[in-house]
Image (tube, helix red, strand yellow):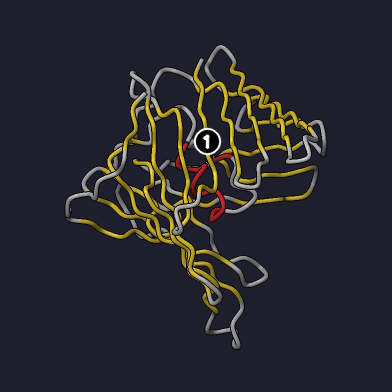
Amino acid sequence: MKSTFYLPIAALACAVLTGCSVKESTISQPEPVSELISQIRTEQRSGDVAITTFFYDEQQRVKQQITTLVDTDTQVSSSVREFVYGNGRIDIGTDNGEPLTLLLDEEGYARELVSGDRTLASYHYNANGYYYEPEQTEGRWSDYQYLLAGDRCNLAMIKKYGPGQSSVVPKLLSTTIFEYGDLANDANLNLSYLIAQESHGDNTFPMLYGWGGKRDSDLPKMRRTEDSAQEVEYRYTYETDDADRITRITEKDDTGATINTYTISYK
């Protein structure tokens, strides 16, 4: 097994893409490796462990996800999520809550997540097919900025806003910045999402499976979040096997302490 540490990317002619400003796509998506991820084991600094196992149908689509949680008191809990694919929709069954339905757009990307007659989340994409979050009814939204370098495109920055002292001027709540290296985000599941999910929000799990718009071209080496109270930076190193598949991701904070370790197994 070999470890890969990121080196800085050479300076390239870049453009920052925000919202829906891009009119024409010239971006190539990573071609997923043929091997399917069968399990992701997440070990947290607290000692809690989450083991998520994936099962696939004949078309190599995720049909079932089983997550087992083991906390520091060795208490075990599990949850099951099943996926049934239909015309323009994916029905999602769970063993611990209401069934969900993910409605898809013409590109096969998530449009709405609904439960019965309630809309839990809506999904929006810029002209290149990358996720962004428009203004919400309560005055909160996030500005997603993507960095285009040649044929590579990655999420570079998320600015979260909330209501300000006036209805005209919003309040900047936090800024999250990402930096990338030279490892392609080419597993069948979107591993970059594992790192970015804290910044994306609770209802963006479709990104893991490829339903949440186009994925980042590369894997991050750094994520830094700044708000009015503090600045926190996380760095990521990767291990690969002899087939160059990502088998381990280690997340450390700016003190060098390990926060999360992801161990990835393949079929």
Q: Quadrant of residue 162?
A: bottom right
Instruction: Identify the secondary structure beneath mark 1.
Output: strand
Residue found at x 77% / y 50%: 118
Q: Position of residue 174 (x, y in %)?
A: 52, 69
Q: Position of residue 247 (x, y in %)?
A: 44, 27
Give the residue type at disc 1. Answer: Tyr
Left or right of 196, for residue 201: right
Left or right of 120, for residue 61: left
In the rendered image, the residue lying farthest to the bottom is 165
Between 182 and 147, the residue placed more toward the observer is 182
Name the quarter where the N terminus is drawn. Answer: top left
Residue found at x 21% / y 46%: 150
In the rendered image, the residue lying farthest to the top is 58
Q: How many marks?
A: 1
Q: Is residue 103 above or below residue 246?
A: below
Residue found at x 55% / y 73%: 173
Q: Position of residue 10 (x, y in %)?
A: 17, 50
Q: Residues within 10 Å of mark 1 (few under 14, many from 20)?
A: many
Between 246 and 66, the residue placed more toward the observer is 246
The residue singled out by tag 1 in the image is 262
Q: Position of residue 212 (x, y in %)?
A: 52, 42
Q: Quadrant of residue 242?
A: top left
